[in-house]
Amino acid sequence: MTPFQYAHASDAADAVRRARVTGAMYLGGGTNLVDLMRETIERPSALVDVTGLSRDIIEQKNGGLRIGAAMRNTALAEHRLVRKRYPVLTRAIVAGATAQIRNMATVGGNLLQRTRCTYFYDEEGSRCNKRLPGQGCDALDGFNRGHAILGASKACIAVNPSDMCVALAALDAVIHLESLSGSRRLPLTDLHRLPGDTPDIETALAPGELITAVELPPLPPSMRSSYRKVRDRASYAFALVSVAAALEIEHGHIKDVRLALGGVAHKPWRAWKAEEALRGQPANEAMFGCAADAELSEARPLKDNGFKIELARRTIVAILSQLAGELA
Ligand code: SF4
């Protein structure tokens, strides 16, 4: 590990001030960043510890929630209002990592966790454009079973590993940001980038910008939501494919629907095309399959991951059928 300075921020303004140092990074639970530092993939000159910042959940007048970015993942998943109003979020968080990691990980840190592409972590033996721009990507011709089928580029085929972010994408979450130039809000679906020619730039955050909170808009009371994750083993494994879904049905037809996919792209993949195909249509398995096909029509399999396309289709159909059954 490369030597670094450490400072504990007293509030958001203090954190942003301290992060002015070139090469400084914010430290949440450290469950990803510290691993990357041990591997010397990340070499921050300074860590600004933001775990002392807001970890509250504040109920909004409109029925939504504002979640402090320092809140631990376990606390968020277990919170009474989250379990009741956003079960998709509770399920997604509980599907991720281990209990010990969830106890440490923060909401802000989870939003910024980096890919688990094995070539990215193999600094000694593999080429990686994300780690070193212009170097090449050994995953392209390597073992790419876990890599992207949507939105990838010739520069990078990695996937975003977060479960929580998939649920937040489906829930239209909004991120609150603080920097020396003021504060702003950003839709979660605009936070993460597709790789393009610059896979090393993973988010729309400006240098030094701090995530202070996540806002969840209210869901209609008649909407049901859930999360389904398909992986190689039952715990401590990243998604091959996951789906976050929320569904509202009126008189047998789909009034509203939210769908997002995980494990398939460089960012949590909001399934806009599938949603559009479903609104106003009968809530049945055939329709769910047509919508999944519409979303996956641009999927491009790699050498080892063609199975993901059918897996994503089946997972979309399965979770929507489950929710439709609960609403019947
Ligand atoms: Fe690096 Fe992306 Fe290629 Fe993985 S897929 S080796 S992260 S450039």
Image (cartoon, helix red, strand yellow):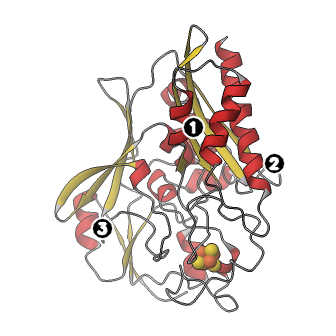
The percent position of residue 258, horizontal first and vertical second, equals 52, 33
Q: Give the mark, 2 or 3, whose residue is nearer the N terminus.
A: 3
User: Looking at the image, can residue 230 be seen?
Assistant: no
Residue 236 located left or right of residue 173: right
Amino acid identity at mark 3: Ala
In front: 93, or 57?
93
Amino acid identity at mark 1: Ala
Mark 1, residue position: 274
Q: Quadrant of the C terminus?
A: top right
Q: Secondary structure at mark 2?
A: loop
Mark 2, residue position: 234
In front: 181, or 33?
181
Q: Secondary structure at mark 3?
A: loop
The percent position of residue 159, horizontal first and vertical second, equals 61, 63
User: Looking at the image, can residue 105 be seen?
Assistant: yes
- How far apart are the two marked residues, 2 and 3, measured between alpha carbons? 37 Å
Say which of marks 2 and 3 sits in front. Answer: 3
The percent position of residue 15, horizontal first and vertical second, equals 29, 65
Q: Secondary structure at mark 1?
A: helix
Amino acid identity at mark 2: Ala
Q: Quadrant of ligand 1?
A: bottom right
- How far apart are the two marked residues, 1 and 2, measured between alpha carbons? 28 Å
Residue positioned 32% across, 61% down in the render: 210
Q: Residue furthest top?
A: 251
- How far apart are the two marked residues, 1 and 3, measured between alpha carbons? 32 Å
Q: Give the mark, 1 or 2, whose residue is nearer the N terminus.
A: 2
Residue 198 located left or right of residue 268: left
Residue positioned 75% across, 79% down in the render: 142
> Is 96 drawn above or below residue 202 in the view shown?
above
